[in-house]
Amino acid sequence: MKSAIRWLATCLAVLLLLAVGIDALNAWRDSAPYHFGGDGGAMANRWAYRSLAAYLLTATLIACACVLALLGMWAGSMALPWRRACVMPLLVLIGVIATDWISEIL
Protein backbone atom coordinates (compact mmCIF):
# COMPACT_ATOMS: atom_id res chain seq x y z
CA MET A 1 0.00 0.00 0.00
CA LYS A 2 2.84 2.42 0.81
CA SER A 3 4.39 1.72 -2.57
CA ALA A 4 1.13 2.53 -4.38
CA ILE A 5 0.78 5.80 -2.47
CA ARG A 6 4.40 6.68 -3.26
CA TRP A 7 3.90 6.03 -6.97
CA LEU A 8 0.65 8.00 -7.02
CA ALA A 9 2.31 10.95 -5.24
CA THR A 10 5.26 10.72 -7.62
CA CYS A 11 2.99 10.79 -10.67
CA LEU A 12 1.09 13.79 -9.33
CA ALA A 13 4.30 15.68 -8.52
CA VAL A 14 5.76 14.93 -11.96
CA LEU A 15 2.54 15.99 -13.70
CA LEU A 16 2.47 19.23 -11.70
CA LEU A 17 6.12 19.82 -12.53
CA LEU A 18 5.48 19.28 -16.24
CA ALA A 19 2.36 21.45 -16.29
CA VAL A 20 4.06 24.32 -14.47
CA GLY A 21 7.15 24.04 -16.66
CA ILE A 22 5.19 24.06 -19.91
CA ASP A 23 2.96 26.90 -18.76
CA ALA A 24 5.91 29.02 -17.58
CA LEU A 25 7.71 28.43 -20.87
CA ASN A 26 4.60 29.51 -22.81
CA ALA A 27 4.21 32.61 -20.63
CA TRP A 28 7.85 33.50 -21.17
CA ARG A 29 7.61 33.17 -24.94
CA ASP A 30 4.25 34.91 -25.41
CA SER A 31 2.77 36.70 -22.42
CA ALA A 32 -0.16 38.30 -24.27
CA PRO A 33 -2.76 35.62 -23.34
CA TYR A 34 -1.93 35.84 -19.63
CA HIS A 35 -3.23 39.40 -18.96
CA PHE A 36 -0.66 40.48 -16.39
CA GLY A 37 -1.19 43.63 -14.39
CA GLY A 38 -4.76 43.38 -13.12
CA ASP A 39 -6.79 43.61 -16.34
CA GLY A 40 -7.59 39.95 -16.79
CA GLY A 41 -10.48 39.18 -14.45
CA ALA A 42 -10.45 37.30 -11.18
CA MET A 43 -7.05 35.64 -11.64
CA ALA A 44 -5.34 38.97 -12.27
CA ASN A 45 -5.84 39.99 -8.65
CA ARG A 46 -3.52 37.27 -7.42
CA TRP A 47 0.13 38.01 -6.71
CA ALA A 48 1.43 35.61 -9.37
CA TYR A 49 -0.39 37.52 -12.11
CA ARG A 50 0.82 41.01 -11.19
CA SER A 51 3.72 40.73 -13.63
CA LEU A 52 5.53 38.24 -15.81
CA ALA A 53 8.45 38.18 -13.37
CA ALA A 54 6.14 37.33 -10.45
CA TYR A 55 4.49 34.60 -12.52
CA LEU A 56 7.83 33.05 -13.47
CA LEU A 57 9.04 33.29 -9.86
CA THR A 58 5.90 31.50 -8.67
CA ALA A 59 6.38 28.80 -11.30
CA THR A 60 10.01 28.36 -10.22
CA LEU A 61 9.01 28.01 -6.56
CA ILE A 62 6.37 25.41 -7.45
CA ALA A 63 8.91 23.49 -9.54
CA CYS A 64 11.46 23.58 -6.69
CA ALA A 65 8.82 22.29 -4.26
CA CYS A 66 8.01 19.43 -6.65
CA VAL A 67 11.66 18.48 -7.09
CA LEU A 68 12.26 18.63 -3.34
CA ALA A 69 9.20 16.45 -2.73
CA LEU A 70 10.40 13.91 -5.30
CA LEU A 71 13.79 13.86 -3.62
CA GLY A 72 12.13 13.27 -0.25
CA MET A 73 9.96 10.47 -1.58
CA TRP A 74 12.70 8.55 -3.32
CA ALA A 75 15.88 9.19 -1.31
CA GLY A 76 15.88 6.04 0.78
CA SER A 77 19.20 6.80 2.45
CA MET A 78 17.87 9.98 4.14
CA ALA A 79 16.47 9.83 7.63
CA LEU A 80 12.68 9.82 7.82
CA PRO A 81 12.36 13.30 9.40
CA TRP A 82 14.43 14.79 6.58
CA ARG A 83 12.33 12.99 3.98
CA ARG A 84 9.17 14.37 5.55
CA ALA A 85 10.71 17.83 5.65
CA CYS A 86 11.37 17.61 1.91
CA VAL A 87 7.71 16.87 1.19
CA MET A 88 6.34 19.64 3.42
CA PRO A 89 6.84 22.59 0.99
CA LEU A 90 4.72 20.83 -1.63
CA LEU A 91 2.01 20.05 0.93
CA VAL A 92 1.97 23.67 2.09
CA LEU A 93 1.75 24.81 -1.52
CA ILE A 94 -1.19 22.48 -2.17
CA GLY A 95 -2.88 23.84 0.96
CA VAL A 96 -2.41 27.44 -0.18
CA ILE A 97 -3.78 26.66 -3.64
CA ALA A 98 -6.77 24.81 -2.16
CA THR A 99 -7.65 27.65 0.21
CA ASP A 100 -7.29 30.12 -2.64
CA TRP A 101 -9.73 28.11 -4.75
CA ILE A 102 -12.15 27.74 -1.86
CA SER A 103 -12.07 31.48 -1.15
CA GLU A 104 -12.77 32.10 -4.84
CA ILE A 105 -15.86 29.86 -4.71
CA LEU A 106 -17.21 31.39 -1.52
Image (cartoon, rainbow, N blue to C red):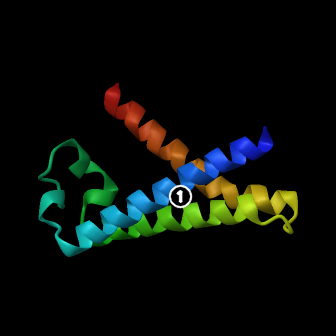
Reply above or below: 4 against 28.
above
Image label count = 1
**Image position of 47 (left or right of 102):** left
Q: In the rendered structure, which amino acid carries the disc numbered 1?
A: Val
- Count residues near mark 1 (Cα–Cα under 10 Å), then give few for <14, some for 14-19, many for 20+: some
Q: Where is residue 10 in the image (x, y as percent from the top left)?
A: 62, 53
Q: Where is residue 7 in the image (x, y as percent from the top left)?
A: 67, 49
Which quadrant of the figure contains the N terminus? top right
In front of the other: 62 or 43: 62
Residue at 14% over, 59% down: 33
Mark yes or no: residue 52 visible.
Answer: no
Q: Where is residue 66 in the image (x, y as percent from the top left)?
A: 56, 61
Residue at 69% over, 66% down: 71
Q: Which residue in the structure is indicated by mark 1?
A: 14
Residue at 33% over, 33% down: 104
Which quadrant of the figure contains the C terminus? top left
Q: Where is residue 98 in the image (x, y as percent from the top left)?
A: 47, 38
Residue at 41% over, 31% down: 102
**Image position of 28 (left or right of 1):** left
**Image position of 98 (left or right of 6):** left
Q: Is mark 1 on a helix, strand or loop?
A: helix
In front of the other: 78 or 11: 11
**Residue located farthest toward the top when viewing the structure as drawn:** 106
Mark yes or no: residue 13 visible.
Answer: yes
**Image position of 27 (left or right of 48):** left
